[in-house]
Image (cartoon, helix red, strand yellow):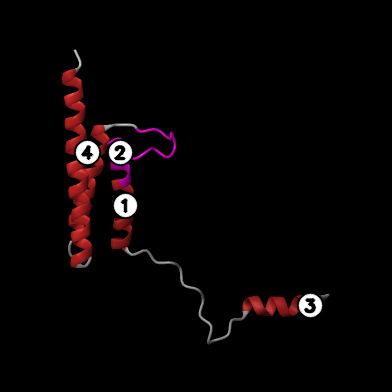
């Protein structure tokens, strides 16, 4: 039994010189910011009532939160300007423009609906 344990102990304490320890996953900050943009944009769509909330399975509106998410996306897109390619930056600007236009449309629709009610 001691003979069986010896090779295991040696194997765990010795590493061949050609083998390098596994490297920890590194996080690239621009990629993390892109993740945040995707998360915030999805929340904005939900808070505008244009995407179903996956938890409640309902359409819900919360315009102040939608506005905050859209503003944050705008700031993050500008932070990435010099860290992504031109094509990706243009796609992010298009995403932001779509969020802003849909927000304006949803707010206007709600205000029109409230004005028509007596």
Q: Which residues are magenta?
A: 42-59
- In depth, the one of 62 and 80 nearer the eye is 62
* CB atoms of marks 3 and 1 within 8 Å: no
For image coordinates 31% across by 52% down, the residue present is 38
Residue 91 to residue 1: above or below: above
Q: Earlier in the sequence, mark 2 or mark 3?
A: 3
Q: Which residue is mark 4?
A: 67
* CB atoms of marks 1 and 4 within 8 Å: no
Q: Is residue 54 left or right of residue 74?
A: right
Mark drawn on residue 47: none
What secondary structure is marked by label 4?
Answer: helix
Q: Which residue is mark 1?
A: 38
How far apart, in angstroms, are the residues tagged by discs 2 and 4? 14 Å
Residue 2 to residue 64: above or below: below
Callout 3: few (<14), some (14-19), or many (20+) C-alpha neighbours within 10 Å? few
The secondary structure that most of the magenta stretch takes on is loop
Q: Nearer the viewer, mark 3 or mark 1?
A: 1
Q: Which residue is mark 3?
A: 4
Q: Nearer the viewer, mark 2 or mark 4?
A: 2
Q: Is residue 19 left or right of residue 107?
A: right
Determine the residue located farthest toward the front in the rendered image: 116
How far apart, in angstroms, are the residues tagged by discs 2 and 1? 15 Å
Q: Earlier in the sequence, mark 4 or mark 3?
A: 3
What secondary structure is marked by label 2?
Answer: loop
Q: Earlier in the sequence, mark 2 or mark 1?
A: 1
For image coordinates 22% across by 38% down, the residue present is 67
How far apart, in angstroms, are the residues tagged by discs 4 and 3? 65 Å
How far apart, in angstroms, are the residues tagged by discs 3 and 1? 52 Å
């Amino acid at each position: 039994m001691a003979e069986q344990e010896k090779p295991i102990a040696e194997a765990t304490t010795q590493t061949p010189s050609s083998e390098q320890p596994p490297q920890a996953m590194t996080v690239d900050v621009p990629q993390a910011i892109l993740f945040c943009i995707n998360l915030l944009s999805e929340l904005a769509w939900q808070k505008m009532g244009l995407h179903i909330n996956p938890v409640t399975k309902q359409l819900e509106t919360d315009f102040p939160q939608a506005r905050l998410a859209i503003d944050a996306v705008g700031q993050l897109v500008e932070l990435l300007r010099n860290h992504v390619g031109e094509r990706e930056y243009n796609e992010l600007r298009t995403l932001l423009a779509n969020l802003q236009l849909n927000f304006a449309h949803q707010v206007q629709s709600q205000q029109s609906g409230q004005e028509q009610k007596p």
